[in-house]
Amino acid sequence: MDCDCMPSHKDEIACMALAMAYVPWQDFKKLFCEEEAWRKGTIFEQMDLDFKVGRCS
């Protein structure tokens, strides 16, 4: 797709970024052993949080 991103361009949306992500740096503290990490789905103990199902109040 040719896009010069000038204001006179007919399809300005095509020139915009699809998304921007913010990913904070993960400290490598308190790691699970490999077997436990596979069971939990994460190697980071601090990321092993309870999943709570419900509605926001």
Image (tube, rainbow, N blue to C red):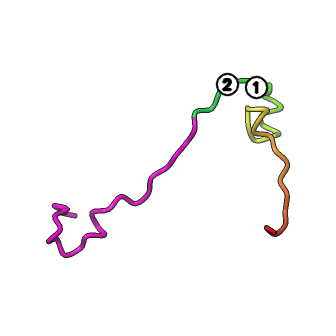
Q: Position of residue 54 (x, y in %)?
A: 84, 66
Query: Looking at the picture, does residue 5 appear above or below residue 42?
Result: below
Residue ID for mark 1: 31
Residue 28: numbered disc: 2
Q: Is residue 17 magenta?
A: yes
Q: Residue at x 81, y 69 (%)?
A: 57
Query: Looking at the picture, does residue 56 appear above or below residue 31?
Result: below
Q: CA distance from mark 2 to mark 1?
A: 7 Å
Q: Which residues are magenta?
A: 1-24
Position of 48 with respect to 26 (left or right) is right
| Location of residue 29 (image quadrant) | top right
Q: Position of residue 24 (x, y in %)?
A: 57, 38
State the count of labels.
2
Label 2 with label 1: CB-CB less than 8 Å: yes
Position of 17 with respect to 29 (left or right) is left
- Secondary structure, mark 2, is loop
For this orientation, the residue located farthest to the front is 57
Q: Amino acid at mark 2?
A: Phe
